[in-house]
Amino acid sequence: AQEHDTSRRKVSDSHYVGNAAQVADHYNARPDVGVQNRELSPIIGLKKFNNWIKSVLVGLFTHRPRGGPGAKVLDIGCGKGGDLQKWKQARIQLYVGMDIAATSIDQARDRFNRLNRPGFDAFFFAHDCYSQSIKDALPGYLANKDMYDNVSMQFCMHYAFESASKARMMIENVSRYLRPGGKFIGTVPDSELLLDRLKAIPEDEDLRFGNGCYSVQFEERRHKGLYGHAYHFYLEDAVDDVPEYIVDWENFVSLASEYRLKLIYKKSFHEILQEEKDSRDFGPLLGKMGVINPEDGSSQMDGDQWEAANLYMAFAFEKS
Ligand code: SAM
């Protein structure tokens, strides 16, 4: 497989819209610690669990033709390329990674170059996928109608819900080159759960909840409509106080339907574990990926990490 380095372009500051500069700066500044140092992270159990969840999603929804060429995948908000190995396991033929954080894109490209026999081609682009069309960044040979079998957005879609125009551009980019029958998969904070926790905070108290490994700080108590309801999220050794936005789920599903995307799967991370922990495909992966100790089945996650894990849910849509 070859890697085509077509994008050394940085997203210039003048292109940033809304809070995008703050988000890009945060992710650009986070070091790529490598696999060995990652083991030292205080939330390594949670990181491994999140990776297992993403492997389940990739496994459940990647088209694997018998004997034919593998899937073509567009990973929007790909970060440092943490999912490259999962896509390798899914025996894809093409991977296109895009992210607003140019440093992360360089690290993702490096990570791809270090993969042992990836078996697929990969291309990487620094691009603000919530304010600009992806057609402005992709060369013609990566921007064909009905080209992609999968679009993936992991732990990143919620940043688009700052405004209606960003959410619309995001979903337009998702749908633009996805083929009919293709799957759009992702992971986002569960906004219903966040709003329930917010509601439960007594009057006169700080609009904040969390535990030793995460915190969520709201600015306003009132759910202020479909877009722009901000909260600040902190996750130990991962996210430092970045503004994120409530994804009003019903509104999102109806927005997606305007772009021919129909919801086929929605589950909390806890539900996914319950459903897949003993499955033939994904059960053994729990031990292999270090989520549990294969000897005695014990988890690397403590109670605080387990609570943080369930702030998220996973989804899949199918294009008609
Ligand atoms: N998907 C990766 C993963 O699962 O490891 C990275 C997740 S990280 C929590 C969120 C990513 O969303 C960051 O890399 C960030 O730069 C990216 N992001 C945020 N806003 C974006 C935008 N407007 N366009 C493209 N990527 C964006």
Image (cartoon, rainbow, N blue to C red):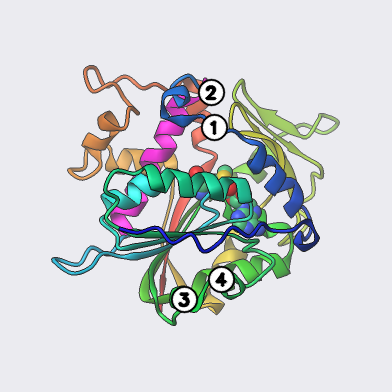
* Residues packed near mark 2 inside 10 Å, few (<14), some (14 to 19) or many (20 plus): some
The secondary structure that dominates the magenta segment is: helix
Give the residue number, with chain letter if any, for mark 2.
304
Residue 58 covered by magenta stretch? yes
Give the residue number, with chain letter if any, for mark 3.
177
In the image, the residue with mark 3 has its CB under 8 Å from the nearest atom of ligand 1: no
Which residues are the magenta region? 42-61
- Judged from this view, the residue extending furthest toward the bottom is 145
Q: Amino acid at mark 4?
A: Asn
The disc placed on residue 308 is 1
In three-dimensional space, the C-alpha distance between marks 3 and 1, rounded to whole angstroms, equals 34 Å
* Residues packed near mark 1 inside 10 Å, few (<14), some (14 to 19) or many (20 plus): some
Q: Eyeballing the image, is 232 above or below 44?
A: below
In three-dimensional space, the C-alpha distance between marks 1 and 4, rounded to whole angstroms, equals 29 Å
Give the residue number, with chain letter if any, for mark 4.
173
Which mark is first along the chain, 2 or 3?
A: 3
Q: In percent of the image, x 74 and y 58: which residue is there?
A: 12
| Relative image position of residue 320 (x, y in whole percent) | 40, 79
Is 199 left or right of 299, judged from the image as shown?
right
